[in-house]
Every structure is written in C-alpha cells, then in structure tokens.
Image (spheres, grey):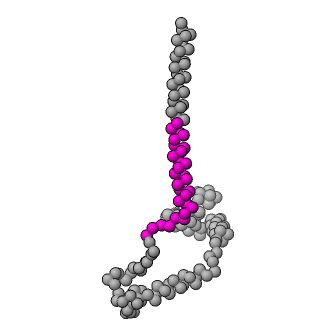
Amino acid sequence: MKINEYIESGILEAYVLGSASEAEANELLHLKAQHPQIEDALFKLESDLERIAEHMAITPPPNTWAKIEGGINELVKTPQFEYLIGEEPKESSRGSRSGKSAQFIEVEAESGHMRIRKIWRWVFFAVFVLGKIFLAFAIYYYLENRHTQEEIEKLKTELENKSTK
C-alpha cells in the first residue's frame, strides 16, 4: 500500500472526526508509528480543524457563566435537591413536601397556549385567503383550457371532413 494513497483515502479525516471504526483507528495508529508522513498529515489535519473551529467559534455573552452558576445554586438550595445530596428536607413555604418524586422540578406557567403576535394572525389569514383565490383561478383556467382544447378538436375534425369532401 502506498502511503500517499492511504493518506488521501479519507481514513485520517474519519479518525480525526471520530467516525473511524476501531480496526481502522488501530491500523492508523500502527502506521503512524512507522511512517512520519502519516504523522505529519494527521498533525496538519488536526491543526486545520482546530483553526477552523477557532475561527467559527461564537463567544457567549459575558454574563452567561454567572447565570448558569446562579441557576445551579438555586437548584441546590431547593428542598428537594438538598434531600438528594444527603441533607434532610426542610419545610418549604408551601407546607410539607408533596407526594411527588424529588427528582422533578415543578414548573408553573401562565397558560398552556402558545402566544402568537397579532400581526401573524393577519398574515396567516391573508395567506389563507390568497391560497383560496389562487385555487379558484387555477380551476377556472383549467376548465377554460379544457374547453378550448375541445373546441380545437372539433374544428380539426370539421376541417378534416371538409378536406375529404
């Protein structure tokens, strides 16, 4: 097997992306130890992918970590989670613990309906009405076309009859 053909076969890319099978990965590691060209190609591919990832990275807003940390701290402070980490549950402001499992967090919402801005209601209505209008025009022009085709066929048969007489 030629080393350049092996490098161009796509096995290096599959290995770097993690989609190579275990046998392919073992073969690559074995050949990498024997051939410096494979090691160089693998290093170049890894550095190129790293450069692409750095170039395309999106930095999160500066206060994101503080929000995540605050959310985790709030979860740990709830009585259900204190019980899970080994402390005894305390009486909550709602009274005693309900019969629900401690692994779930209660979520309270205003309503179960999705809110749609009023402008979208009008847009949906307009699209619906325009769809019906276009459907009516399509049916009308289809019937007109069919009627015209029938007239053309009649005229053709009349011409053929006249030409044969």
Quadrant of the image containing the N terminus = bottom right
Left or right placement of residue 98 versus residue 2 in this view: left
Image position of 75 with respect to 34: above or below: below
* Quarter holding residue 81: bottom left
* Quarter holding residue 106: bottom left
Question: For this rendering, which residue is in front, 46 or 3?
Answer: 46
Magenta-drawn stretch, dominant element (helix, strand or loop): helix
Q: Which residues are magenta?
A: 112-140
Q: Does residue 2 appear in the picture of this structure?
A: no
Q: Does residue 115 appear in the picture of this structure?
A: yes
Name the spot of residue 87 as percent of width and height, x first.
39, 92
Image position of 141 with respect to 22: above or below: above
Question: For this rendering, which residue is in front, 94 or 119?
Answer: 119
Image position of 85 with respect to 32: above or below: below
Residue at the limit of the structure toward the left, as seen here: 99
Residue visible at 52% across and 36% down in the picture: 140
Name the spot of residue 32 as percent of width and height, x first.
59, 67
Residue visible at 54% across and 31% down in the picture: 145
Left or right placement of residue 140 versus residue 97 in this view: right
Residue visible at 32% across and 83% down in the picture: 99
Question: For this rendering, which residue is in front, 33 or 18?
Answer: 18
Name the spot of residue 29 as percent of width and height, x first.
56, 68
Name the spot of residue 6 as percent of width and height, x first.
60, 59
